[in-house]
């Protein structure tokens, strides 16, 4: 799956599942964009963290320190959790497809159409395995 650049740069430093966990645990705020409210996340990354720091509590100390090494002193504005949630959903769909579960059953489980399930599997490029880049789930 292609993630937005703002998420991909974090993934390159701490990994996919850690980035997913981080973004889902960040506070959100609403911003008015062209007449509609958009949910956003923002994160200031300190230059270093200790065991009791909020980032260490969310990610674990070692991963939080990796984040600081990569982005210390910067303010990150990653895309909201929608892309992460879609990636997690699609990874589950692909695992079920890989186990031989019929697409109509998978579709019912995720409140999607049979065609949407087939498209997700087709776009994954591997006929029912995990999404590309999903190997650290």
Image (cartoon, rainbow, N blue to C red):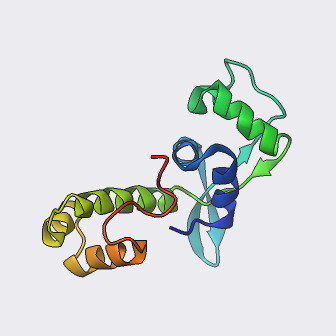
- Residue ranking furthest to the front: 126
Which residue is located at x 58 percent, y 65 percent?
3
- Residue ranking furthest to the top: 51
Q: Would you say residue 5 is visible in this rendering? A: yes
Q: Is residue 40 left or right of residue 50?
A: left
- In which quadrant of the rendered view does residue 43 lie? top right
Q: Is residue 130 left or right of residue 20?
A: left
Q: Position of residue 48 (x, y in %)?
A: 81, 29
Q: Quick check: 91 above or below 118?
A: above
The tally of labels here is 0
Instruction: State the residue in front, 119 or 52.
Output: 119
Which residue is located at x 37 percent, y 58 percent?
91
Q: Is residue 86 left or right of residue 45?
A: left
Q: Position of residue 100 (x, y in %)?
A: 17, 62
Q: Position of residue 74 (x, y in %)?
A: 83, 47
Instruction: State the residue in front, 98 or 33.
Output: 98
Which residue is located at x 52 percent, y 55 percent?
81
Q: Position of residue 128 (x, y in %)?
A: 31, 67
Q: Is residue 57 left or right of residue 132?
A: right
Q: Quick check: 67 above or below 121?
A: above
Instruction: State the residue in front, 5 or 123.
Output: 123
Q: Would you say residue 55 is visible in this rendering? A: no
Q: Quick check: 5 above or below 54?
A: below
Q: Quick check: 55 above or below 75?
A: above
- In which quadrant of the rendered view does residue 46 lie? top right
Which residue is located at x 42 percent, y 74 percent?
125
């Amino acid at each position: 799956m292609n993630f937005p650049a703002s998420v991909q740069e974090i993934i390159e430093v701490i990994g996919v599942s850690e980035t997913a966990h981080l973004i889902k645990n960040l506070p959100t705020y609403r911003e008015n964009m062209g007449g509609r409210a958009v949910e956003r996340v923002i994160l200031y990354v300190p230059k270093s963290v200790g065991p009791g720091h909020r980032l260490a509590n969310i990610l674990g100390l070692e991963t939080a320190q990796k984040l600081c090494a990569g982005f210390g002193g910067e303010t990150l504005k990653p895309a909201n959790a929608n892309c992460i949630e879609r990636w997690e959903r699609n990874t589950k769909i692909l695992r079920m497809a890989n186990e031989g579960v019929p697409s109509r059953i998978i579709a019912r489980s995720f409140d999607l159409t049979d065609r949407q399930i087939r498209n997700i599997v087709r776009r994954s490029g591997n006929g029912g395995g995990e999404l590309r880049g999903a190997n650290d789930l």
